[in-house]
Image (cartoon, helix red, strand yellow):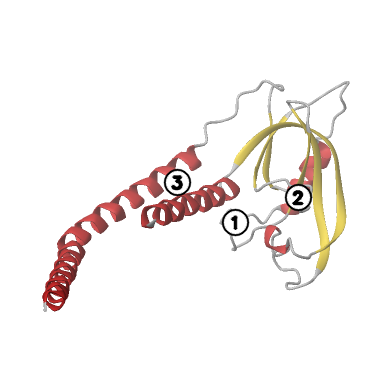
Amino acid sequence: MFAIIKWTFRITLLTLVAAFLHYTLPQTDIVRITDTYEKRVDFGENSLFWAGGDVGGPTGTVNRDVFFIQARRAQGDVMVYRNEDTGWGWPPYFKFDTSNLQAEAADAKSTAGSPQYYALKHYGWRNEFLSIFPNAISLRPVSGPDAEKSLPWLNIVILTLLAAITYAIWVRWRRFRRARLDPRLEAIEDSLAERQGRLRRWWKERRAK
């Protein structure tokens, strides 16, 4: 039973960490931009998935205007991105150029008859049910829908560092457990076993009388 609880905890923790990294780390889509617009958004239960507003603007508001970028990805499916500053907050992209990026996206619009494709870097998820959108970070032109995405060096570096830190913590924890915890646990188990033995002997002697 204890083993089941332990593995359930481990799997749950790994799932949460993987989801956090998948949401936070940058991804790149090859897209054709179809439109840009600005919309008044009322924040509710999904406010966690929105940024804190443009740097220098009002904070703590329940609604504000948000830029959006409509696009069609190279695979043909439609995608909508929000365009918000991250500022000095989380995730640490230090994005302050929301208006400039919106102007670039508006200038990059094209039609299916004369398509122009771009590599749009973003983070976050798209979920229609929760009305959440990935946040666009940058935009650069590419040769076409089959253009190769640049190697995600940032993701590789971050994941490598996290793996190294996790391994270092795990090694030190194992050393600490072997040196400090395991002997104490063994002593406790031996003490419990000795007490159980005494109790059994006492019970046998009592029954024998």
Q: Is residue 54 visible?
A: no
Neighbours of disc 1 within 10 Å: few (<14), some (14-19), many (20+): few
Q: Is residue 77 above or below residue 94?
A: above
Residue placed under numbered mark 1 in the picture: 94
Residue 91: percent from left, percent from top: 58, 56
Residue in the picture at 67% in, 43% down: 138
Residue 205, by quadrant, is: bottom left
Residue placed under numbered mark 3 in the picture: 158
Q: Amino acid at mark 2?
A: Arg
Residue placed under numbered mark 2 in the picture: 82
Q: CA distance from mark 2 to mark 3?
A: 25 Å
Q: Find numbered disc 3 in the image and state the secondary structure of the residue it sits on.
A: helix
Instruction: Return the disc, 2 or 3, that comes first in the chain's sequence.
Output: 2
Q: Find numbered disc 1 in the image and state the secondary structure of the residue it sits on.
A: loop
Residue 150: percent from left, percent from top: 56, 30
Q: Nearer the viewer, residue 60 or 102?
A: 60
Q: Is 12 displayed left or right of 179 in the figure?
A: right
Q: Nearer the viewer, residue 196 or 77?
A: 196
Q: CA distance from mark 1 to mark 2?
A: 16 Å
Q: Amino acid at mark 3?
A: Ile
